[in-house]
Amino acid sequence: MTLGRGDTGGRGRREVKPLQIQDVGELGLLERLRQFCPSRLIGDDAAVLAVPPDKRLVVTTDVLVDGVHFSDRTTTSEDVGWRATAANLSDLAAMGADPMAITVGLSLPGTVPVEWVAGLYRGMGQCLQRYGGQIAGGDLCRAPTISVAITAFGSVDAAQALYRSGAKPGQAIVATGRHGSSRAGLEVLLNPESAANVSALARKRWVSAHQRPHPRFDAINCLRRLLSTGASIAAMDTSDGLANGIVQLCQMSGVGAKVERSQLPIDPTLIAWRGEEEALDWALYGGEDFELLLCLPPAIALEFVQQLGGDAAVVGATIQAPEILLTDSKDASWVQPLTLDRGFQHF
Amino acid sequence: MTLGRGDTGGRGRREVKPLQIQDVGELGLLERLRQFCPSRLIGDDAAVLAVPPDKRLVVTTDVLVDGVHFSDRTTTSEDVGWRATAANLSDLAAMGADPMAITVGLSLPGTVPVEWVAGLYRGMGQCLQRYGGQIAGGDLCRAPTISVAITAFGSVDAAQALYRSGAKPGQAIVATGRHGSSRAGLEVLLNPESAANVSALARKRWVSAHQRPHPRFDAINCLRRLLSTGASIAAMDTSDGLANGIVQLCQMSGVGAKVERSQLPIDPTLIAWRGEEEALDWALYGGEDFELLLCLPPAIALEFVQQLGGDAAVVGATIQAPEILLTDSKDASWVQPLTLDRGFQHF
């Protein structure tokens, strides 16, 4: 496989014009991408997949657009591939499902380097290799902007599917890990000089949270071991921010919530860097941390948090609707209602 | 639901600025689109679907881009919705599968009228209502260009799945209907004056073939009634043109083909309008007719063509590889090799 140097062409070396898609044509590009897909799944009008017996099919779609969700300034195409795949797999994890496959709808200009597309597929492949699933085909077409539409398929026992609407008042609200780190990673990438005093380790941790998020299938597996059937549970991922997650779970379940700000898992180095207020803002509204947010019976929640370890934490409790409040145990007069309005909106 | 006048705003009337997506925001748009999706399938991170017992899952993705696959000059958003859905369902039909659901990944500028998006979803809904399946969610994001990525899910008995690789030498090649009509419809829309002498009925027929293609589930049902298990069959749809279909079936099956040009189902009015050569060219390379192309044992092929009726026809026969030739029974010296190179290529 002959690839151009792509977008990794270095300074100080003589520039070699990378091989572009329009140089190899649609058929030439498809030929190169074939290696990333199992041959039994491509070459037909559609892919045929076996859903395990007695399981339900779980499907989800995410679209990533150049300049909106990623840019060459902050993300290599391998990272775009990983992140787009991880975002979809995270939705499967949030439903309690195991990954089976993805399809890829890719639109892009003919001037994109072939190596950029190969990198994209490598990144998708790496994520699938780590978490399970295969590339089951897709579609490729010319467009003025790069856009990557991924649909992921998973499977779940009907009785083990997790929904946003499963919460009851009096449950514990659990976050599986730190929030705000992806937003911090973006800041490091966009304004590296602003993080000059932050340790290299923390910067690397945040950039990795931004570029290579991990769907929390480990949390789902841990939860399954703890669950007696019939326990009422609500779950979703925090791709649109922690505040969005809390509000969505509450609204879909018809409950309220009291969340304690000191319990929110935020990287202490991030608080030291940006101050308490901005770190809180990034945790609540930054988005793209791809952790899970769950409402569980309190006893199960404590055991879950202990067994899962890391930065998983009980961050609050569900109450009777309608209030959804962030409180501060250190300052009884401080209270902040959580809303959907502050999160990232596309339009 | 308050909608702007959208792209149907008429001449001679006072122009009212249509309500745009950026006027209602992402949440406002999602609110309006909710009516098109069954409520049990949306509102979570992913949709949960039941695949019928003992069936395989069939998945396919198509991306349509504004200015490449459609434009306001030729296609209303309802037609875009119908066509994008029909294109995906046609891939399911080509695999012998029944439709279950679609997901929709929609990227678009904030200046698109809300009514345009509502029309898109109406068109998708109309096609699904006709052929089966539901909208099982999707994703919505801002982008400089409109792009519609649809993934369709279907189900099929493992033993009844149709593949491109199933052809054997000595089989009949069957096309389920006319080719070139979609290309003719596009011409009528782009250059209406060129078709001034064509009957209104024919123009309407071609425009409809272009804007509202029909996936041939009827042909699959007819085929199932005729099939003894174990018959070797190859199938695909002709979305990329008849020539592309013939070559793909042959290459995937390791056979050759002799196709007789006089047997190709082409609208006689189209031949009268454009002449034999151009009509043939449109039939072979125009694409988007969304008929099925099948390789069948000859006896089954004849019965299939009779029972299916309409313009279904045996157009040739498979032979030993490698030649894939178009011949003319009226002129023994005329022969044309069929290739993939002439079809529409994106880059």
Image (tube, coloured by chain):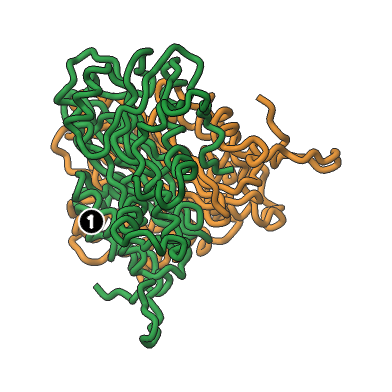
Chain colours: A green, B orange
The part of the image, by quadrant, that contains residue B163 is top left
Q: In x, y percent, where is residue B104?
A: 45, 39
The part of the image, by quadrant, that contains residue A22 is bottom left
- Residue B278 drawn above or below residue A137: below
Residue beneath the point at 25% across and 59% down: A34
Looking at the rendered structure, the kind of residue marked 1 is Met
Q: Secondary structure at mark 1?
A: helix
The part of the image, by quadrant, that contains residue A284 is top left
Whether residue B246 is visible: yes
Residue beneath the point at 21% across and 27% down: A304
Q: Which residue in the rendered view is the most extreme toward the bottom?
A: A14
> Which chain letter goes with mark 1?
B
Residue beneath the point at 37% across and 34% down: A264
Q: In x, y percent, where is residue B335?
A: 36, 69
Between B215 and A162, the one lying in front of the other is A162
- Residue A164 drawn above or below residue B228: above
Q: Which residue is mark 1?
A: B252
Q: In x, y percent, where is residue B155?
A: 28, 31
Between A325 and B141, the one lying in front of the other is A325
Specify whether A154 is left or right of B202.
left
